[in-house]
Amino acid sequence: MSPALWHHAVVSGCLRWITAAIATLAFTQADAGREYVDQGRRFRFSYPAAFGAPSTGTNDGFEDRVAAIRFATFSSGIGGEAALTRGLPVIDIQAVGGLYDAIALEVFPEPMRRLIVAALPPLSITNFCQLLAQEQHLDPQVAALSPLTAPQKAVVTSVDRMRNVSPRVIQCVVSGPTVTFDKEVGFQPGGPRQHVYGAVRFLEAPYTTFQIVRAGPVPDPAVLSQMTACDRGAVSETGRRDRLHPVPRETTSTSAAAPTAAASAVVDSIDLVHI
C-alpha cells in the first residue's frame, strides 16, 4: 500500500472511531440519571436526565397530594408528573376511572364525596390490576349511596367512567410493592381511544403511593421501564424501600446518578422521610 493510501486509511479509521465514541458519549450523557431532593427534605428519587428539569407540579401540597413534581420534557403532554400521596389511594389521569382520581373527585360536594369514598373498594397492590380493568367500580344503587338523588347517582356513574370507557388492559405487572401498567381506553363513549400508562408504588403509612402516570399514544417499553425505576431504584438509609427516612444533608438536588432503565424507574427510586 502506498504511503498516501495508508495515510488515508488510518485517517478514515480514526474518524470512524471518533464518531462512534462521540455518539456513545452523547447516548450515555442523555441516559444519565439525576436525583431530585424535596426542598423540605422529606423524600428523594432518581429520574432520567432526558425527562428535563423538575418544577412544582399540579396541586402540589394540596390536601392528600403531599407533593407533585413536573418535568420540563416528560410532563409536556398529558400527565407525566411524579406524585407522592397519602390518605385514600388515588391515581392520576383517571387511570382507574374518575372515582379514584383526586382532581375528578373535586366535582362532588364534600358530604357527597365522603359517601363515595367510604363506599369505594380501597386500591391496593393486590387488587390494582383487577380494578384497572373495570369500567365501573361503584354501583350507584348500593345502600351506602341511598341518601343520593337519582341525578346525583347518574353523576357518580359518569365520573366513574371518566377516561375509562371500555378499558382494555395491555399489561399490568406487579413486582413487590410496585405495579407497572398500560391500558387502552376511551375518554368518553364514541370518542378516540388512548393509552394510559405508568407505575405506582404502594407505601406504608403515613403515605399511600408514589406514582408517575401519563396518557397518549402507545408507550415505548423503555419509557415504562424508566417510570418504574424512578420508584424502585432508591433505598432508604436503613436499606428499606417501603418507609421514609431522613435525607442526608450533603445530598444535592440535581447530582448525577447511574443510568436508569423511565415511570417504573422513577417510582422505584423513592426514598422518603416521615413528615
Image (cartoon, helix red, strand yellow):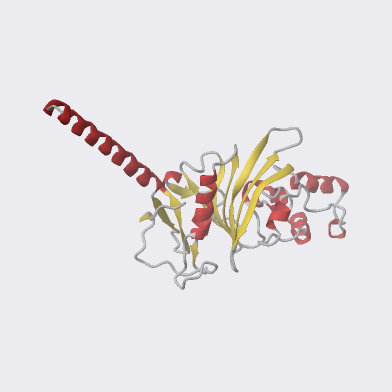
Which residue is rendered at x = 52% and y = 49% of the image?
57
Q: Answer with left or right where residue 219 lies relative to residue 160.
A: left
Q: Position of residue 258 (x, y in %)?
A: 38, 55
Q: Answer with left or right where residue 186 lies relative to residue 262.
A: right
Q: Is residue 206 above or below residue 222?
A: below
Q: Answer with left or right where residue 150 lies relative to residue 134.
A: right
Which residue is rendered at x = 37% and y = 43% of the image?
27
Which residue is rendered at x = 80% and y = 53% of the image?
138
The answer to whether one can see residue 175 in this image is yes
Q: Quadrant of the N terminus?
A: top left
Number of numbered discs on residues: 0
Q: Position of residue 156 (x, y in %)?
A: 79, 48
Q: Which residue is at the front of the view, 151 or 8?
A: 8
Q: Position of residue 73 (x, y in %)?
A: 47, 41
The answer to whether one can see residue 266 in this image is no
Residue at the far left in the pictured view: 3
Q: Is residue 267 above or below residue 12?
A: below
Q: Answer with left or right where residue 275 lies relative to residue 37.
A: right
Res. 143 image quadrant: bottom right
Q: Position of residue 109 (x, y in %)?
A: 74, 52
Residue at the far bottom in the pictured view: 238
Q: Which residue is at the front of the view, 269 or 39?
A: 269
Residue at the far front in the pictured view: 1
